[in-house]
Image (cartoon, coloured by chain):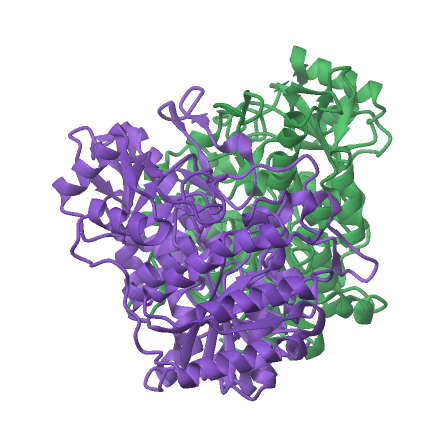
Chain colours: A green, B purple
């Protein structure tokens, strides 16, 4: 690892703008922004993927490896990534720092605590929670309806026992009521942190967050609880982006990490903006497949921040296409041409969808050991048929050397194509049901939308409060274009069921809930934490 | 503020041993210990106080100011303090970084998040909690009795609604059971962090923590849950002491902050040891008054770590003595000679008690604006009568200049007195009831101890498990020598009621619970958080 001061210097960041966290991590001071803000922006490239499968597609891996390879090819490139959440790291999913020769480092510290941003979000969130219950305890001047408080508590842990709890039991411990915990990445504050322009905008957004309703049915916001300025103070360091590096010393901004279902699943706007000033090309990623991640990246993050992606890289693997073609998880290693061809329908639709945003697409075929040449050729051939460039990526095994084909293809795309055609999909001034219908028609390809009674009541509230200008944030299974996890490939004609619609007024979107969305994961029978340990040199081992 | 690299250099710490957190905070690397460990130790001075009163005694303030003044007087002195907890900071108590001209800085960052140590404790604690419930969920191979799990969850927040909760409600969310949250500083892990010798000892102590009992009534430890190595990894940075400075640039090690009732209320052993190698004199403090804080400092921290305090500074104020003499909170500003004389009984007993540990005492009269000269003289005269040196401290108003009299008196004490006579009060091999009786007789001056049925059952368990070698950690009201908060002054002849005895096997003590001990504070009607804000320059304002 190089000292982060060296990595920063090479990226053109003067040492005075660094707030070091040890020798290998640094926060970037707002003073850097003052120096950078009038510089021209680099080009923004989104790395997204086909629908996720149990085999793993390697989106973070590809983002890191591509940034390494672009630099190796002489293009000054910075990656902008999300911060890993501790919960999944200790649970099942493992770390989120790439793998093989395409990793960000120090992986152990990035995965555990990092610079404390997620802990700050947890604290700010739970301060508001405590102040809500305290408000009720001390007389409830706002006449809050204890049955209609939507603001829960959060913890950065996979802990199913906290999903649904009763609080305030015992004498003098407040009003008894049902509540629960979400994982911190599901906190609206995380979404707010990732969408805000700066600390002042953060505070404005925190102010308008909805915590519940009073007994007259009127919304009550965080501002009315009196917690907002203290919350802002608690987040004053968290709002600063973090600088780390890849194994090859490429600068990487790792900042923020909202859930990809009930939130928008992208790293912070602030971090992306810094990166765009520091590099010719910025490679970033979004959660889940392109139907959720890329769509929210375009329709929520880019729209709100006025960003325009120049290209999208769609990660596919032979295994993911076979899985989408109907092969079971344990048979994915065997060749299966028919399934691969069937599964290509999934890739094809994502490519088509990305085109609807006016963004040119490059397919990255993430190569796994054991993938057959015939299958890789089949994918290349399909891309040729579709008129879309494709390149094989072997960054896991080879680092930048394995990403040169991909880097060259991206350079070519950025030079040749018209990369200025980006537009979000739906209009700001369409109403919420119209926005949902647009997504279902254009992206998911369903036939109809069925709103539950609860969803209809929520739509009526949205109408009454004049909130149709919000974006929609779809909370849907990532495994299918539809709301049914087992409808793989490219399903159509289905009816999408909307169970409820909740309001994230600080983030600026209405969350459209389809199916059963879990916002507090559980631990598996053998949690990853059981294997995590420090070796004799004090190095962390056993991170998945 | 000076750069922390400069403060470190002046203290003799090479830059290679610093792990910076911004420009003004640093963790001290274990490599520094390798360099320091064979150096001679400085003298250890404990700052303690009479029983706390609503007027505030200024123990932390005096510790900081004394360290400043000692340096001004030419004695290389380092202070070793506890880390502030966020909960009280956002609630009622405010920050814990001193005040006026005797503060540690950057106060805002030390009070909010600091270097993340408390967040790491929260995370490690809650990982164990989640893994306990997960163990039960996945078949309960250890046959844990869900009714006898003592390990709760923690949060660094004042949130009374979480004191008593029911978890695991809803389908698929685990076993429904009663549980609750404590504030993080009440976590046994915080006590363990503050008593351990190093990371290896931390892991050993975490391993033996008691989480509950199985259905056969046998104890189940954290090690059996399989979480200990991951918890150690989560704490690998938290175990390193933090270096900051006073307003006058004095080096201060701020590390760890366990509760002073159910735990021992002292900053970390590791931090104290580093400080002793770096300075001629180390000034440290312990929670509450000398009956609890100093006693635990001597009997738990010093005994376990093999430390020997050379002197104790007992902080008194005219107001605290008047309060102990029966004056009500709102009448403390008025002169009241009779009450002052009556309240001196409290000071006198603490002086006598400290003598029982073989430690010479210096009384620090912390001067508040408005204190009358007559009252100060009365206190001086009482000390003269008792043959104990006393000095007035005006460090709040004047910084080191206001602490010179105190510093000179301390120097004189350290030079003239035999400072090598320290011994803990009770014998290691006495049984738990005998240890309790010793404290009640020698320190509190009660007549008898009444054990509840629950306490007797706990004593039987201690006997059966062979745990009489533990120290005792008294959880008692800090406001009185007795277990009754309103018995001020120097009560005697009372019966101390022991409600229960719990086991902190990692920390190495049995917690003797008298009265109703709250381990999760609540917020007041107007929480401090309501006044906390960033000003136009981004500086934190409104910290109490």
Give coordinates of residue B190: x percent, y percent: 41, 54
Q: How many labels does the image show?
A: 0
Location of residue A50 by image quarter: top right
> At 40% across and 43% down in the image, what residue appears?
B482
Q: In this view, does A255 lie to the left or right of B122?
A: right
- Say which of A217 and B509 sits in front: B509
Q: In this view, does B394 lie to the left or right of A526?
A: right
- Say which of B531 and A313 sits in front: B531
- Examine the rendered structure and indicate whether residue B446 appears above or below residue A197: above
- Say which of B297 and B15 sits in front: B297
> At 48% across and 29% down in the image, what residue appears?
A163
Q: Is residue A158 left or right of residue A148?
A: left
Give coordinates of residue A419: x percent, y percent: 78, 55
> At 28% across and 60% down in the image, what residue appears?
B425
Location of residue A327 by image quarter: top left
Give coordinates of residue A530: x percent, y percent: 30, 48
Residue A404 visible within the image = no
* Most distant residue in the top direction: A453
- Examine the rendered structure and indicate whether residue A466 appears above or below residue B106: above
- Say which of A446 and B304 sits in front: B304
Residue B290 visible within the image = yes
> At 81% across and 62% down in the image, what residue appears?
B537
- Examine the rendered structure and indicate whether residue B526 appears above or below residue A147: below
């Amino acid at each position: 690892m190089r000292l982060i001061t060296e990595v920063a210097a090479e990226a053109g960041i003067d040492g005075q703008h660094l707030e070091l966290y040890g020798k290998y991590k640094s926060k970037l001071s707002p003073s850097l922004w003052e120096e950078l803000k009038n510089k021209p922006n680099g080009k923004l490239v989104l790395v997204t993927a086909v629908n996720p499968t149990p085999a793993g597609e390697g989106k973070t891996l590809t983002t890191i490896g591509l940034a390494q390879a672009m630099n190796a090819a002489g293009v000054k490139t910075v990656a902008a990534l999300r911060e890993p959440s501790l919960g999944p790291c200790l649970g099942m999913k493992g770390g989120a720092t790439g793998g093989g020769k395409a990793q960000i480092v120090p992986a152990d510290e990035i995965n555990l605590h990092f610079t404390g941003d997620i802990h700050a979000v947890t604290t700010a969130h739970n301060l508001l929670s405590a102040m809500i219950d305290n408000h009720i305890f001390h007389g409830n001047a706002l006449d809050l309806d204890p049955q209609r408080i939507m603001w829960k508590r959060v913890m950065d842990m996979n802990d199913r026992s906290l999903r649904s709890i009763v609080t305030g039991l015992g004498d003098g411990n407040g009003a008894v009521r049902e509540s629960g915990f979400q994982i911190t990445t599901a906190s609206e504050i995380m979404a707010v942190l990732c969408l805000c322009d700066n600390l002042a905008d953060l505070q404005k957004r925190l102010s308008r967050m909805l915590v519940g309703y009073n007994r007259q049915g009127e919304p009550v916001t965080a501002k009315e609880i009196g917690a907002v300025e203290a919350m802002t103070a608690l987040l004053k360091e968290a709002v600063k982006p973090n600088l780390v590096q890849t194994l090859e010393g490429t600068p990487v901004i790792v900042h923020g990490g909202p859930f990809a279902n009930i939130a928008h699943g992208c790293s912070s706007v602030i971090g992306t903006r810094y990166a765009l000033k520091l590099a010719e090309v910025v490679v970033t990623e979004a959660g889940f497949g392109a139907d959720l991640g890329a769509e929210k990246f375009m329709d929520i993050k880019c729209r709100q921040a006025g960003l325009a992606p120049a290209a999208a890289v769609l990660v596919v693997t032979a295994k993911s296409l076979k899985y989408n073609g109907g092969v079971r998880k344990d048979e994915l290693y065997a060749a299966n041409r028919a399934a691969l061809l069937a599964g290509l329908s999934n890739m094809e639709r994502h490519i088509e969808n990305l085109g609807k945003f006016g963004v040119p697409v490059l397919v990255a075929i993430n190569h796994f050991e054991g993938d057959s040449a015939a299958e890789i050729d089949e994918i290349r051939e399909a891309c040729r048929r579709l008129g879309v460039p494709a390149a094989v990526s072997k960054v896991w095994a080879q680092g930048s050397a394995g990403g040169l084909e991909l880097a060259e293809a991206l350079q070519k795309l950025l030079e040749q194509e018209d990369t200025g055609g980006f537009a979000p999909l739906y209009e700001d001034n369409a109403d919420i049901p119209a926005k949902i219908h647009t997504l279902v028609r254009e992206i998911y390809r369903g036939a109809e939308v069925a709103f539950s009674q609860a969803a209809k009541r929520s739509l009526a509230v949205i109408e009454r409060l004049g909130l149709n200008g919000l974006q929609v944030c779809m909370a849907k299974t990532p495994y299918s274009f539809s709301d049914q996890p087992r409808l793989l490939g490219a399903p159509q004609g289905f009816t999408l069921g909307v169970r409820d619609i909740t309001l994230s007024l600080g983030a600026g979107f209405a969350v459209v809930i389809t199916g059963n969305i879990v916002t507090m994961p559980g631990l598996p029978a053998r949690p990853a934490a059981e294997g995590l340990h420090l070796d004799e040199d004090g190095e962390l081992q056993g991170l998945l």
